[in-house]
Amino acid sequence: MFSPLNLILLKNELYTKYHNTLSQKSIIRAHNDSHAKRVPRWCGLTIHFTINCPFQCLYCYIEDMSFSFGNAKPYPLKPEEYVFALLSNPYFLPGRWGTFLAIGAVSEPFAFKNHAFAVLSELVKLGNPIQFSTKAYLSSNDADKLKDLSKFAPINPLITIITLSAYNRLEPKAPSPERRLETIYNLSEAKLKPVLFLRPVIPGINDDEVIEVMKEAKEAGARGVVIGGFRVTRRILIRLEDAGFNVEKIKSRVRVIDDKQRSVPFPEKKEIIKRAQELFGRNVWSSACCANATNAGVLCASVCYIGERCTKCNNECYLKNLPDATEVISALSMLGIYAEVRNKIVLIKKVPKNIRKGAGFLIRTLSRREVRFV
Ligand code: SF4
Ligand code: SF4
């Protein structure tokens, strides 16, 4: 089991190391960057390799988040600046037991491959569990490079394939599913453990072919699957309708469709998970963070083992020991957080104002317990 205190000490040590080697200009750029301030989401702390996305998937929400489908460019930070930005982020903790890093949330991370590999080569020095989701073609050479990098930090590749038949309408600019299956094959041959990212499952649009997609991915070498639902906005619905898709099932499940991302109820998920387990055994997850946790062999940092998200996968978080309660309390007090630990729950009594926004995630990562504010 990891030591929560050591995570904080390691962060301080690494911060000083990078601070001493970076130029003043780089320090300021990293400090001011959003990676230094961003609050982690459920899947972990999102890392952006690319601004905007060239793939133009119809179901994509990035245009609703002020990004665009045109003018894609590499994110303007140098590799060391990314790392220093993370070390400056109050919610980030380094190491294998530290914050999960999730790459590819708002764009295709390998759109600019040289940039992606340069950043990954620096990020792995932190040792955190790294997960990327991609639709790009990764050659066997790319796969070998990733395998080499995985000696320093666990790397969990998620390859998104959600349709075999409608991809040229749904994902008009992305590499074909066949190329993505080849990517899975290449990664698997390189002895990485590629996982099929079957998200979004869109009611009435691709829900009838998910079993076929899983079979193909398994055949290509996928070691498991993450299954996830769909969030809709008005803009996405219009795009789907304009492309000739039948959106009645979506409309019937969501009362309000507006500019906000709204989850479309996904009652089929349980059945799809069952079918997936017939194919992949216990390597089936309903949250991306669980695939990352399993690949790294650590307790899920989002604490999915408590509650319905847990699919009781091979990682068996629910059987693992939790970090020592007294040490959790000491580590939290170093951050100015006052808390009590009761079995699998941390009761938070006081959190400094400046870290209140992302405190829940930080405390979950440090304690691997459910967090309640009292
Ligand atoms: S690849 Fe991802 S980020 Fe890019 S358009 Fe498709 S869904 Fe959006
Ligand atoms: S055991 Fe449950 S919580 Fe842990 S990684 Fe597997 S699915 Fe997630």
Image (cartoon, helix red, strand yellow):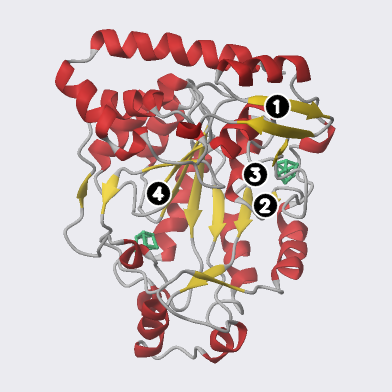
Q: What's the residue at 56%, 26% (across, down)?
A: 98
Would you name the residue on which mark 4 appears? Answer: 104
Q: Quadrant of ligand 2?
A: top right
- First reached walking from the N terminus: tag 1 or tag 4: 4
Determine the secondary structure under disc 2. Answer: strand
Beta carbon of the mark 4 residue lies under 8 A of ligand 1: yes
Give the spatial CA distance, label 1 vs label 4. Answer: 34 Å
Q: Which mark is residue 290?
A: 3
On the question of residue 316 being in view, the answer is no
Q: Locate residue 297 relative to residue 130 in the image: left or right.
A: right
Comparing 102 with 168, the one in front is 102
Quadrant location of residue 211? bottom right
On the question of residue 208 being in view, the answer is yes
Contact flag, marks 3 and 2 (Cβ < 8 Å): yes
Determine the secondary structure under disc 4. Answer: loop
Give the spatial CA distance, label 4 vs label 3. Answer: 16 Å
Would you name the residue on which mark 1 appears? Answer: 339
Q: Quadrant of the C terminus?
A: top right
Q: In which quarter of the image is the N terminus?
A: top right
Beta carbon of the mark 2 residue lies under 8 A of ligand 2: yes
Place of residue 297 in the rendered image (x, y in percent of width and height, measured from the top left): 67, 30
- First reached walking from the N terminus: tag 4 or tag 3: 4
Q: Nearer the viewer, mark 3 or mark 1?
A: 1
> Mark 3: which amino acid?
Cys
Give the spatial CA distance, label 3 vs label 1. Answer: 26 Å
Would you name the residue on which mark 2 appears? Answer: 285
Q: Residues within 10 Å of mark 2 (few under 14, many from 20)?
A: many
Give the spatial CA distance, label 3 vs label 2. Answer: 6 Å
Give the spatial CA distance, label 1 vs label 2. Answer: 31 Å
Q: Locate residue 57 relative to residue 202 in the image: left or right.
A: left
- First reached walking from the N terminus: tag 3 or tag 2: 2
